[in-house]
């Protein structure tokens, strides 16, 4: 069971194993390369970087609008598993459709990716909300970290196969590296769907609140609950301050994850180094996600978050001056030490501040803050790179955002959380 206490915990954590293939192969590595080398072929390099940043931001704008509405409606209709099922199937299908994108079709590539990414983000709203249902007493930090650990291993295992498809396409009966990328996208869709099956078999959805399945307009009711939650959030001042801090520091972290490969290509790092370094990140992140979970349990969650923020500040400072491939490998290792920890502990830290009966609704807001941050980050990065003609200028913006988040986090009272 690899650290899980029971079948429900294992099935919950296994979804991270399932969907991390999308975040690793599609979001972080192969699709950025495919976009710049194939879909946007013929465009100026800096312009292609800007377009990729804008594509990321458009997807997140849509996800931001949907997240709190989906959380509120699902809570009322007691339909979190049904909603999650719809988005998993949609995301897996559209990920596979990237197979059909051809040279120069950057608009089609962007459109398919936006749909897949919105589905990925929306499914996570419901997935996160099940953490409170599944985790036993005192196990939220641990289980949240365990989920990320599973994700790094699962995403990393498939990514090994995907790298072989690209670097050794002949082993799979493929004629080129580009065909290898296309088949990798199909494999991600299949992987995502298959490993989600245990979640739907074994996770029980706890019913809370009133049942509005017969409501005339449940979407309208969802909007009403969103605004009601906005007013109610004033009662949870500590949670609000944390969300504000999270908005800034996760903006920087999320942008690094999504733009690292594009940045590496712009400063001259070869594709094989980009793929290899990010694969290494996956397997380093596995043990360190567990370490962060234990650190939060033995010390404090806030201390663990500050350690991760400090490491990211160092990464950005070095990254601004990056010139050689080996430096990209070192920075990938450093990202691996803290990427899972900062995400997992932020998720569980917020879970300690919210009322259990409104878990999906409040996690919808958590998701909004997370995704809205990744609206601003990639767009700012792409805009700065396009305007200045220098991708390094975008890194400076990320350092400012990280610093603001660290300052605000200092005002969160962990004992009250």
Image: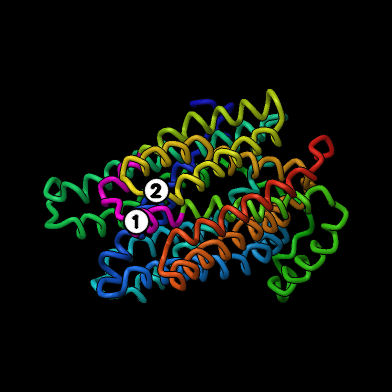
Left or right: 274, with 339 as reference point: left
SS for callout 1: loop
Is residue 401 something one can see in this rendering?
yes
Q: Dividing the image into 4 quarters, which one contains the C terminus?
A: top right
Q: Which residues are magenta?
A: 258-279
Left or right: 324, with 139 as reference point: left
Label annotation for residue 267: 1
Is residue 193 something one can see in this rendering?
no
Task: Report x, y in % for residue 385.
Answer: 45, 67
Q: Which residue is mark 2?
A: 322
- Are the residues at dot 2 and dot 1 in contact (C-beta closer than 8 Å)? yes
* Secondary structure that dominates the magenta span: helix
Task: Give residue 292's quadrant in the image.
Answer: top right
Q: What's the residue at 79%, 37% (across, down)? A: 414
SS for callout 2: loop
Magenta span includes 262: yes
Which of marks 1 and 2 precedes in the sequence? 1
């Amino acid at each position: 069971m690899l650290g899980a206490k029971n079948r429900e915990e294992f099935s919950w954590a296994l979804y991270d194993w399932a969907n991390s293939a999308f975040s690793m192969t599609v979001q972080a590595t192969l699709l950025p390369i495919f976009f710049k080398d194939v879909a946007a072929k013929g465009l100026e390099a800096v312009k292609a970087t800007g377009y990729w940043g804008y594509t990321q931001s458009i997807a997140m704008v849509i996800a931001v609008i949907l997240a709190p509405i989906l959380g509120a409606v699902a809570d009322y209709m007691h339909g979190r598993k049904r909603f999650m099922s719809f988005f998993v199937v949609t995301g897996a299908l559209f990920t596979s459709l990237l197979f059909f994108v051809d040279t120069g079709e950057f608009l089609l590539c962007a459109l398919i990716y936006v749909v897949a990414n919105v589905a990925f983000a929306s499914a996570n709203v419901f997935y996160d909300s099940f953490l409170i249902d599944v985790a036993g007493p005192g196990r939220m930090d641990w289980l949240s970290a365990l989920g990320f650990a599973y994700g790094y291993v699962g995403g990393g295992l498939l990514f090994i196969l995907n790298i072989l498809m690209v670097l050794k396409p002949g082993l799979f009966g493929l004629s080129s590296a580009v065909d290898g990328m296309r088949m990798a996208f199909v494999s991600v869709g299949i992987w995502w769907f298959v490993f989600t099956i245990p979640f739907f078999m074994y996770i029980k959805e706890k019913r809370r609140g009133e049942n509005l399945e017969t409501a005339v307009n449940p979407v309208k009711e969802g909007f009403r609950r969103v605004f009601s939650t906005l007013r109610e959030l004033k009662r949870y001042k500590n949670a609000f301050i944390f969300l504000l801090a999270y908005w800034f520091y996760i903006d920087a972290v999320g942008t690094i994850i999504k733009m690292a490969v594009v940045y590496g290509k712009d400063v001259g790092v070869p594709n094989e180094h980009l793929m290899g370094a990010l694969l290494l990140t996956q397997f380093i992140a596995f043990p360190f996600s567990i370490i962060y979970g234990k650190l939060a349990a033995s010390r404090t969650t806030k201390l663990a978050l500050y350690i991760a923020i400090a490491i990211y500040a160092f990464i950005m400072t070095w990254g601004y001056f990056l010139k050689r491939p080996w430096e990209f490998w070192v920075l990938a290792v450093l990202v691996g030490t803290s990427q899972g920890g900062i995400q997992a502990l932020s998720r569980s830290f917020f879970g300690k501040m919210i009322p259990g009966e409104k878990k999906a609704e409040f996690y919808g807001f958590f998701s909004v803050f997370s995704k809205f941050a990744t609206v601003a980050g990639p767009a700012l990065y792409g805009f700065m790179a396009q305007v200045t003609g220098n991708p390094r200028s975008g890194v400076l913006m990320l350092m400012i955002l990280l610093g603001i988040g660290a300052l605000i986090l200092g005002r969160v009272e962990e004992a009250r959380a």
